[in-house]
Amino acid sequence: MLRIRLIEEGIAELYAEQQMRCPVHLCIGQEAVSAGVCDVLGADDQVMSSHRAHGHYLAKGGNLPAMMAEMYGKATGCSGGMGGSMHLIDLAAGFVGATPIVGSTIPISVGLAFASLLRGEPRVVVAFFGEGATEEGTFHEALNFAALKRLSILFVCENNLYSVYSPLSVRRPAGRPIYRLADGHGIESRQGDGNDVEEVHALAQEALGQIRAGAGPMFLEFATYRWREHCGPNFDNRIGYRTEEEFLRWREQCPVERQRRKGIENGWLSESDVKGWSDEIRDEFSAAVAFAKASHWPETRTMLDHVYSAANSPTVEVGRRAA
Amino acid sequence: MPSTYTMRDSNPTSMARELKYCQAVHEAIDLCMGADPSVYVIGLGVTDPKGIFGTTLGLEQKYGSSRVMDMPCAENGMTGVVLGSALAGMRPIMVHQRIDFALLAMEQIVNQAAKWHYMFGGRKSAPLVIRLLVGRGWGQGPQHSQSLHSWFAHVPGLKVVLPSTPHDAKGLLISAIEDDNPVIFVEHRWLHNISGPVPEGTYRVPIGEARVLRRGSDLTIVALSHMALDAHRAAQTLAGEGIETEVIDPRSIRPFDEQTVFESVRRTGRLLVADTSWRHAGFAAEVVARVAEELGGRLKCPPRRIALPDCPTPTSPALAAEFYPTANHIVSAACEMVQARAWRPTVVPTPFSLDVPDPSFTGPF
């Protein structure tokens, strides 16, 4: 959590330099969900995410220098500079991809789990998404199929109350909890405090245990809050769609601070631990940024290189010729 | 009169065996499933008693229900599912009984599958075949008969093929299944019943290579999908009128083998494009534009397009007869282009009612 927080704060600070020329969607305030869920995953388990993916990528073990280079549009980026912040991937870490069309990676995640079933591979797939995605057709189509085939997939919904500026009140009927949608599809679901990393961890562990035991998919909804603007590095409480008071109430529930306080009160954490980790993370981040800035740009002549995979492709001169 | 139209090469070979187009599709799937356990078939109705017009018949019995399977009515979500499975090493063949149904899946096809390899810098490819059937006749109407191949051809990252012969259907489908990229495989419903020579065993037709169906020196006809059949018929009539046409079936419209078309038009100096779809912003416009850019000054007359009237497909058989262009339209246009005269047919060579491709087609779809 602390690592995700400090890295994203670093991104927010550097964003003003205008060298990261891609939209960034920060998860500051929501880190407990990434950290708590990914902690119970094994190296072979797979994760997919959406536009707000930094936390999921890092928590699953995604390469930090490659992520920063991607955000700086460099050839050394995790997607070779073709994707930016919204298209992160680290296959070695089991982070299969993130794309920013709301809800669209949910069925793709289900497809990963379906392939695991077809191939007899025992892994679990986790699909991370925001509550806005639960309004998309793909969400329901994906849950239906996952339940039908009893796939080994965990759906994790981070409910941060807003889809860009649109509150839940204009997007769903009052009194209908999101996690109950999963029940409607025959998928067992739980709701938890997404700013309490221990609760997230416990719920994820329980869910993973059931999934690994063959119980089929599970659904977790976590209540949380995005501190900064939907897209970009700034705070936006004064532009009128939410209040400063609401933000301050949620900031009181800061997942990083709550855990720090709990650790110190219970004696398993010291201020010097936090200080030491923070220094290490800042150094790691600085090195990743230095790597990204020093890396070379993708060359213009490579622009058409990846439109098609050239492997196993009996196609005549694809790519080089303008279609 | 034969019950089904048989299409032969202008250069017949010794290949004796003939199959229907639908059998050729079936054989391609069967061979690929036998050769590669990661190939599977999914789609609404692929396991039903009619097996997608015979193209998937018996495959579930042969390969089991975990490799040939029906699916929920969820075209977009299920496209995401098959894409995800492709990322994890499977080679899915997804089937939609109408191309119109795939419009529900455009998000996953265009935003996700088409871009996967590119947007992740080539880290992962998406080997995926989507078979889309174009309906026609027996009142298919506005939402069961569209020819939307141009939509897909517009998108970098997709490959789009529309074979017109049984030989090419099999060879291109095998290439499509083995390809590491998403391939849109368009089958015109009126081609399923035509017969033609199909070699035994596995062979591949390269994606992106046009096929010259007939050699000729007066006019180049580029004809897509079912229109290739009409162009072939028209060419026979035109030969009797003293006009020798070169008929090219592009077979693939992304990538598009423009060189074969250029080479032909350089010799004939005339271009006619026949598409199964609308004229406006359609693939015929792309062919004309490329030829104009490359050879504009060398054309002996303005290029022409044969395409659908600018309206949705009417359902009534009375209107459908006027809606679809035929071989006759191609013959008329060719006479005007090459001999600057109107065509006066001695015998109107329309073999069947325009509402059905042949007498074996008795509906309902």
Image (tube, coloured by chain):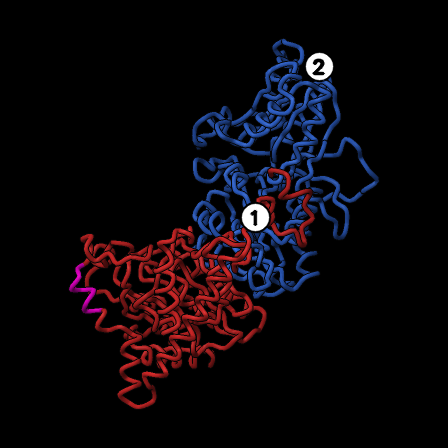
Front residue of B251/B236: it is B251
Chain with colour red in the figure? A
Classify residue A156 as left or right of residue B55: left
Q: Chain B is shown in which shade? A: blue
Q: Residue at x 56, y 59 (%)?
A: B86
Residue B96 in the image: state x and y as whole percent: 51, 49
Give the residues in magenta: A243-250
Rendered image: mark on residue A47: none
Q: Point out the tag, 1 or 2, that comes first from the N-terminus.
A: 1
Q: Is residue A193 visible?
A: yes
- Give SS at disc 2: loop
Q: Chain of mark 2?
A: B
Q: Is residue A247 magenta?
A: yes
Magenta highlight: main SS: helix
Residue under circle 1? B131
Q: Amino acid at mark 1?
A: Arg
Q: Are marks 1 and 2 in contact (CB under 8 Å)?
A: no
Which residue is under mark 2? B241
- Give yes or no for residue A72 being in the magenta stretch: no
Rendered location of residue A108, percent (x, y): 47, 60
Is A192 in front, or is A257? A257
Q: Residues within 10 Å of mark 1 (few under 14, many from 20)?
A: many
Q: Amino acid at mark 2?
A: Glu
The residue positioned 62% from the left and 40% from the top of the image is B255
Label 1 is found on which chain of the structure? Answer: B
x%, y% of residue B232?
68, 28
Q: Residue furthest bottom?
A: A267
Residue B113 in sight in this render: no
